[in-house]
């Protein structure tokens, strides 16, 4: 038995030696100084470099994807702060009885009285929709603690126009007398109080042929908090404005009623009070609801100018606090798209329009309310020209309306000096420089679309 095992081990040993000998015979030995050895080393280095580059590329791609996913997730996180309310999906509108204001007869007693049945409405045409133009309804609600819903003290159509790369604000004065679908004619600010956002949107369609793509809403308390979070807003006050703010209850924080004439950085409570002034003339002499709208547009423009060049880090840091104070029906995808569009526009200024446009309305007392009865045809034409064409229609401009469109300038000898420069008057500056006279036709030729 032992002899057999010894024989088997010997045979296996001989086989292993034979295999090693065969492997040695087949192996190619290359000397260190051989050119072939250098070639093989170069090939190995090239292969290693390709592997490294591939790994770097894959790593970079993974990093970019991780960053992109993080941005999307954080954006969704930020948008989650918004109070989302879509009336198309939730039929939860609480309808309130319609209500009519009564104004001070001592202030408006000299206005002509008009019976509601004698108002003639002349709105014509179709609702306009242009690709590349987004219209958003922005409102600020004035609500008492005991009310379910207050009136819309601020009504602004915010237009993002990618066709001409502009950002525009169309302010509709709250005292504008309009038709309200399903109810009696009333001030436009009562539509929101009666039937919430859906009724206000229907009212805009019925009277001005405006269809909005969504809404953004704040109340007065939220508005003041937003201003505070933004660090206030710098505005210049006249002595009369400062006195009024100190003495009225429109500045809710009594400790903030310490203003004087001059330039100040107003806090939220002060800025809110400023935006509601209507009985005191502006520095340009504008009063009543026109003065209020003028101040609101100035305030929003100041905020825009303060933040248009801010870093993304700064904007992101304050976004949660601000977004949590607004209510909107815009889905996340739409908000992200609008934000990216607004950044891409790189807008340097905001263009504004006030409705009803100057000279296109009558001041009347209806049901003891001081209201502005608009010529709807004129205002529809002006709105369409402003929002979609970028210029105003000459047929609806008269000399007395120049100030309303902020085309304010003065001529001194041969120097053409602009008090407020916008996209239209910049062209006027270049063309009219050197003229010693300026006619209305000069202005209309430069800022208007010729009526066909």
Image (tube, rainbow, N blue to C red):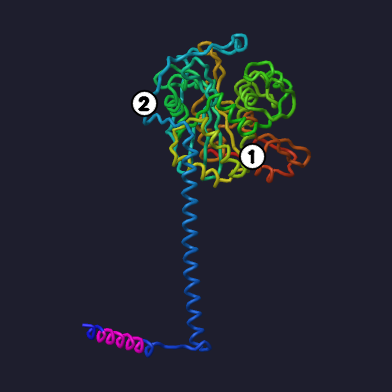
Q: Nearer the viewer, residue 213 or 125?
A: 213
User: Looking at the picture, how far across and down is residue 101, in whole percent?
Assistant: 52, 13
Q: Is residue 121 above or below residue 428?
A: above
**Residue at the spot x=43%, y=34% of the render?**
127
* Residue 446 seen in this snapshot: no
Q: Nearer the viewer, residue 396 or 192?
A: 192
Residue segment shown in magenta: 6-22
User: Looking at the picture, how far across and down is residue 322, in whole percent?
Assistant: 55, 33
**Residue at the spot x=47%, y=46% of the render?**
72
Task: Tell me which numbered mark, 1 or 2, is placed earlier along the sequence.
Answer: 2
Residue furthest to the right: 413
**Label 2: how many Cα within 10 Å (few below 14, some 14–19, many 20+):** few
Q: Main secondary structure of the magenta part?
A: helix
Q: CA distance from mark 1 to mark 2?
A: 43 Å
Say what secondary structure mark 1 lies in: loop
* Residue 422 seen in this snapshot: yes
**Residue at the spot x=48%, y=38% of the render?**
79
Which residue carries the number 1 mark? 422
Which residue carries the number 2 mark? 91
Which of the image's four quarters has the N terminus?
bottom left
Q: Is residue 403 above or below residue 38?
A: above
**Label 1: how many Cα within 10 Å (few below 14, some 14–19, many 20+):** some
Q: Nearer the viewer, residue 51 or 416?
A: 51
Say what secondary structure mark 2 lies in: loop
Q: Is residue 18 magenta?
A: yes
Do the residues bearing badges 1 and 2 touch, measured as CB atoms within 8 Å?
A: no
User: Looking at the picture, how far across and down is residue 295, in whole percent?
Assistant: 63, 27
Q: Nearer the viewer, mark 1 or mark 2?
A: 2
Q: Is residue 296 magenta?
A: no
Residue furthest to the bottom: 25
Q: Where on the picture, by quarter, is residue 125?
A: top left
């Amino acid at each position: 038995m032992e002899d057999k095992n010894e024989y088997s081990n010997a045979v296996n040993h001989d086989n292993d030696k034979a295999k090693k000998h065969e492997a040695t015979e087949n192996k190619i030995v290359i000397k260190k100084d051989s050119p072939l050895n250098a070639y093989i080393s170069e090939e190995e280095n090239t292969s290693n470099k390709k592997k490294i580059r591939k790994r770097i590329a894959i790593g970079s791609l993974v990093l970019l994807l991780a960053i992109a996913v993080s941005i999307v997730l954080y954006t969704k996180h930020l948008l989650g702060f918004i109070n989302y309310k879509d009336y198309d999906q939730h039929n939860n509108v609480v309808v309130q009885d319609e209500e009519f204001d009564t104004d001070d007869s001592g202030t408006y007693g000299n206005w002509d009285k008009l019976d509601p049945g004698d108002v003639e409405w002349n709105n014509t045409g179709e609702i306009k929709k242009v690709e590349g133009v987004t219209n958003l309804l922005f409102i600020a609600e004035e609500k008492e603690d005991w009310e379910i819903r207050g009136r819309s003290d601020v009504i602004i159509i915010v237009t993002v126009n990618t066709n001409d790369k502009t950002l525009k604000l169309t302010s509709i004065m709250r005292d504008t007398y309009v038709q309200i679908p399903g109810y009696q004619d009333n001030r436009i600010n009562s539509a929101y109080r009666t039937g919430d956002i859906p009724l206000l949107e229907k009212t805009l369609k019925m009277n001005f042929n405006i269809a909005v793509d969504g809404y953004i809403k704040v109340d007065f308390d939220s508005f003041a908090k937003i201003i505070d979070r933004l660090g206030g807003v710098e505005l210049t006050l006249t002595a009369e404005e400062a006195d009024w703010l100190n003495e009225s209850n429109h500045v809710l924080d009594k400790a903030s009623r310490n203003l004087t004439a001059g330039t100040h950085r107003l806090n939220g409570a002060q800025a809110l009070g400023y935006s509601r002034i209507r009985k005191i003339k502006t520095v340009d002499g504008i009063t009543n609801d026109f003065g209020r709208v003028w101040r609101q547009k100035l305030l929003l423009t100041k905020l825009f100018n303060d933040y248009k060049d801010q870093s993304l880090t700064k904007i992101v840091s304050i976004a949660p606090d601000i977004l949590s104070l607004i209510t909107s029906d815009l889905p996340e995808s739409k908000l992200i798209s609008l934000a990216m569009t607004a950044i891409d526009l790189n807008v340097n200024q905001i263009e504004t329009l006030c409705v009803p446009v100057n000279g296109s309305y009558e001041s009347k007392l209806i049901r003891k309310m001081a209201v502005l009865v608009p010529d709807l045809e004129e205002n529809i034409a002006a709105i369409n020209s402003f929002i979609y064409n970028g210029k105003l229609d000459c047929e609806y401009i008269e000399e007395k309306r120049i100030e309303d469109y902020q085309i304010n300038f003065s001529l001194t000898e041969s120097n053409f000096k602009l008090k407020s420069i916008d996209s239209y008057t910049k062209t006027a500056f270049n063309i009219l420089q050197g003229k010693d006279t300026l006619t209305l036709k000069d202005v209309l030729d430069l800022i208007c679309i010729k009526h066909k």
